[in-house]
Image (cartoon, helix red, strand yellow):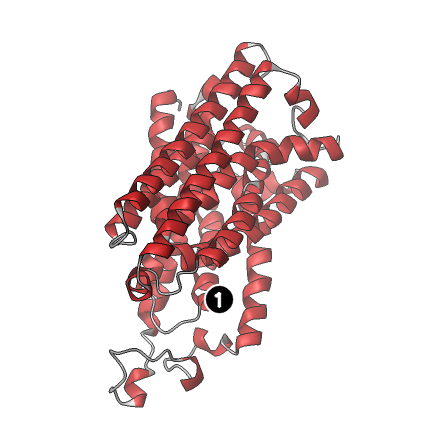
Amino acid sequence: MNLGPFFGVFLHWLGGLASGSFYVPYKAVRQWAWETYWLVGGFFSWIIMPWLLASLMTENLWGVLQQQDLKTLWWTYFFGALWGFGGLTFGLTMRYLGMSLGMGVALGYCAAFGTLVPPLAKSFFPDIPVEASLGEIVGTTPGKVTLLGVVVCLAGIAIAALAGLTKEREMPEAEKKKAIAEFSFTKGILVATFSGIMSACFAFALTAGNPINEASLQAGTNKIWTGLPKLVVVLLGGFTTNFIWCVILNLKNGTGYQYFSRYLRPEHARPTAANASTPPAEALRVPWLRNFCFSALAGTTWYMQFFFYTMGETQMGKFGFASWTLHMASIIIFSTMWGWILHEWKGASRKAHVLIGAGIATLILSTIIIGYGTYLKTQMGGG
């Protein structure tokens, strides 16, 4: 089934809406450490939903995976694992910068390095299944246009970062903490930089897993669902990284009991004005079922971005180059929308609002330029 590029664009926007919204349910989680709710949500994002939907929607999932050569499985898993570092620090970005600024900066890096990581890897590892190395890209007009888009993207990051710095300097500490309890511009920018660069590896993992798509199609899967099997492998890599890190934090912070306990240990309770006079037992009660449900909702919503992404990719035809840039642009727009809805910029000056708006607009412009550069490549017979 192929309904054409316009339907593909619609699916990519649905994916962007899912990605831009996934962190909202986490805000309803109470009395759990970050590593606890992140791992619970992650089980749904990286294990349960990929296997469940791929099993239901595709033919002979296990057989398709078994027939892949080791190189395909390895690179798909490996770059998924590298993405996992970006995924786990993405949650920290939201903690320190909030949704609008955090996603704007992290995804700006992701859009830029999602373009650069594959050709850079090709330069060092010629056997990687990528069409061109960085040197080959620089030597062509489409490549230069694409790299211009990367430069514009970095400019957008700088503008968004300046907006965050302006906000931090202008707003009283109490006002900042109302919207983002752990707001820290310096920590947030450092984490967002690392997260965005590593998250870009997801784009390459998807490319490396294309032989799995082809095998699924040959097994009789409807074309629109053929991207689901490779997500099983990519997200297994991401799960590996996140699982190890979250368990390390559980052990370090002594928070592993939170998965099973309905009460918080006193040393993990955060005193607030609301519970200062509450009896200790009541103050330490954990809404255990609620936390699991909202974490599961967050994880499932996160997975749906790539469920729709792989569907949209099959509909784009010769415009398939636009998939990653469409995805990034839509996430930035929807996450910024949520940031404003949740009053993360309430109390900031007009200057800060203008800067964040300009930063987001510049980031979106960069994705258009990157997409146009790839389009020129297809027009010149390069893909």
Image coordinates of residue 163 in percent, x first then y, are 38, 46
The residue lying at 58 percent from left, 20 percent from top is 144
Pointer 1 local density, CA inside 10 Å: few below 14, some 14–19, many at least 20? many
Number of residue marks: 1
Which amino acid, by three-letter code, is at mark 1? Glu
Up the image or down, 121 lies above or below 6; here it is below
Identify the secondary structure beneath mark 1: helix
Q: Residue at x 41, y 28 (%)?
A: 365
Residue at the limit of the structure toward the top, as seen here: 380
Specify whether residue 276 is in view: yes
- Tell me which corner region of the image, top left, top right, bottom left or bottom right, holds residue 208: top right
The reply to whether residue 301 is in sight is no
Residue at 63 percent of width and 33 percent of height: 118
Image check: 122 left or right of 34? right
**Disc 1 marks which residue?**
35
Which quadrant: the N terminus? top left
| Horizontal arrangement in the rendering, residue 118 relative to residue 188 (left or right) | right
Q: Along the line of sight, which residue is nearer the eye, 251 or 97?
A: 97
| Residue 41: quadrant of the picture | bottom left
Q: Is residue 8 left or right of residue 111?
A: left
Report the quarter where the C terminus lies.
Answer: top right
Position of residue 48 measured from the top left corner of the image (x, y, whole percent)? 46, 54
